[in-house]
Image (cartoon, rainbow, N blue to C red):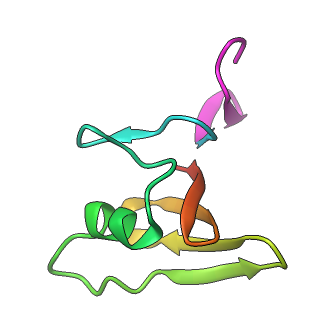
Amino acid sequence: MPGQDICIYSEDGKIVSVACYEDCWYKEKNLIGLAFQDVVQLLAPTNLPNEPDVIEIDEEEVVYEIESADAQIWVRDGIVVTVIC
């Protein structure tokens, strides 16, 4: 998307995910730049375990999947750098 640091992915003419790298607003908070645990508390319903799945680890980033929110959260040094929904 020109002028925005987001990517929209589609398959068969339908949006399947949106990747946000600078701004991802939820409940009046930008998830990008927040501590990972703060994002987990915002996204995960209180009646479900707040234990996201680790789906990838490399030397710099850890990727978590929060199934209840259909989101992947990319974290560097404990801070959210990318959100894919």
Task: From the top left corner, tell me how far across and down residue 80 is, in percent.
Answer: 55, 59
User: Where residue 12 sits in the image (x, y, percent)?
Assistant: 71, 33
Residue 54 in magenta?
A: no
From the top left corner, tell me how far across and down residue 75 is, in percent: 61, 66
Whether the magenta-drawn stretch holds residue 10 is answered as yes
Q: Quadrant of residue 37?
A: bottom left
Q: Hey, which quadrant is residue 15 in on the image?
A: top right
Left or right of 84? Residue 31 is left
Residue at horizontal 69%, vertical 35%? 10
Residue furthest left as drawn: 47
Farthest residue to the front: give it.
77
Residue 69, compared with residue 22, is above or below; it is below
Residue for point 40% across, 86% down:
51
The outermost residue toward the right is 59
The quarter of the rendered structure image containing the N terminus is: top right
Residue at position x 54%, y 72% in the image: 65
| Residue lying farthest to the top in this orientation | 2
In front of the other: 73 or 11: 73
Q: Name the quadrant containing residue 9.
A: top right
Magenta-colored span: 1-17
The answer to whether 79 appears left or right of 27 in the picture is: right
The residue under the point 44% across, 56% down is 34
